[in-house]
Image (cartoon, rainbow, N blue to C red):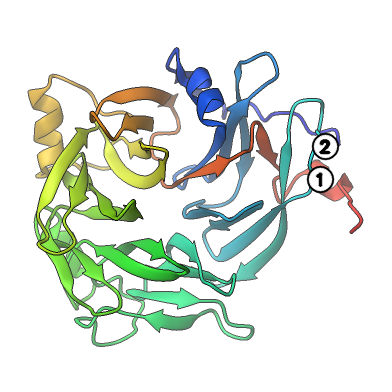
Amino acid sequence: MTNTPSAPQVGTGITVSRGFGAWLGSQQVSLAFTSYQTGQLFMVGLLLNGSVSFNQQNFVRAMGLCYDDGRLWLGSLYQLWRLENMLLPGEQANGSFDSVFVPREGRTTGDIDIHEIGILADGQPVFVNTKHSCLAVLDPVHSFKPYWRPSFISKLAAEDRCHLNGMAMVDGRPAYVTAVSQTDVLSGWRARRETGGVIIEVETGRIITEQLSMPHSPRLANGKLYALDSGRGQLIGVDIETGNKEDIAFCPGFLRGLALHNGFAVVTASKPRDGSFKELELERAIARRDGEPWCGVFVIDLRTGDLVEWIRLDGEISELFDVAILPGRVCPMSLGVDTTEIQNTITIG
């Protein structure tokens, strides 16, 4: 292995909170997050000297992430990638990395706007096909096979009717999804960004709540449902029976990715694009606090709602998408698809 950590994209500065490295070490985790705007997969860990490592590789329109015990799934512009850790336990690459994720398979789906990804009980990926307003799985012949769609969507059409975007997995099956609206017309959700966002129970089709603003990333932990009320900049808890929501933490950015671990939430935040915050409570909330929108990653203590650690990106990268926590991985890296390293990295099973 001759690969070294990729430097951040020219024109982008990355800073971290003073305690961020210590938090990674105390939790025995590393992170992966994506920027669809510039098409990068970032892997974040700790080097032997205790400094924070950022490894960056190019995947066009990198979006949804799912980590599954040594395997990383990544949605991109027209493919679903399977990346495998090529290192055995105890091995290191370049004296620093305990995991090297190699793209071993890219399944071509076409541009279906893959958002979040989960793993079914049989080990196969299921993903949010936002363009067709459904959940889908891979098919050996076709672009995808429909798995489920909301009852208010009358037809599978490449029209992004409700902006179905997030998915919570429970016991190897999709349990809850988020959508910006219940519209059944071409891009109908765009006129419903401020109110009417829904969380839906997949098994029954029941609307848990329809009082959200551009919700994303439902997650279930310890019997409690969490989500991002993105149009308000809030991480929320939602009562599954009543739909009542509780604000947990405000973050100064548009929230899209959420991962939970050991009483902490990790979320990604983006700056506005082409006035995308306008007419949203998020814009007003940042202004009331005399703040500026962030692009970065926040670590939130779920007990207090405090933003305890952070990563901030300034410059060319202003939008992030998903984030995944990698338990037990100290310092991961990946190989890019169009790199010399991937051509020269050969392992034998």
Position in image of residue 224 (x %, y %)? 26, 53
- Indicate which disc residue 91 carries: 2
83 lies left or right of 226: right
Position in image of residue 237 (x %, y %)? 20, 48
Choose top left, top right, bottom left or bottom right for residue 286. top left
At x 25%, y 72%, the residue is 161
199 lies left or right of 338: left
Q: CA distance from mark 2 to mark 1?
A: 6 Å
**In the image, is residue 157 above or below residue 13?**
below
**In the image, is residue 104 above or below residue 87?**
below
**In the image, is residue 219 above or below residue 128?**
above
At x 18%, y 21%, the residue is 291
Q: Secondary structure at mark 2?
A: loop
225 lies left or right of 4: left
Q: Which residue type carries mark 1?
A: Leu
At x 26%, y 54%, the residue is 225
Residue 322 or residue 90, whichever sits in front? 90
Q: Which residue type carries mark 2?
A: Glu
Are there few (<14), some (14-19), or many (20+) residues within 10 Å of tag 1?
A: few
Whether residue 102 can be seen here:
yes
Residue 30 or residue 192, whichever sits in front? 30
Whether residue 112 can be seen here:
no
Assess whether mark 1 and mark 2 are in contact (beta carbons under 8 angstroms): yes
**Residue furthest right in the image:** 348
Are there few (<14), some (14-19), or many (20+) residues within 10 Å of tag 2?
A: few
Position in image of residue 221 (x %, y %)? 35, 51
Q: Quadrant of the C terminus?
A: bottom right
Q: Secondary structure at mark 1?
A: loop
Residue corresponding to mark 1: 88
**In the image, is residue 275 above or below residue 159?**
above
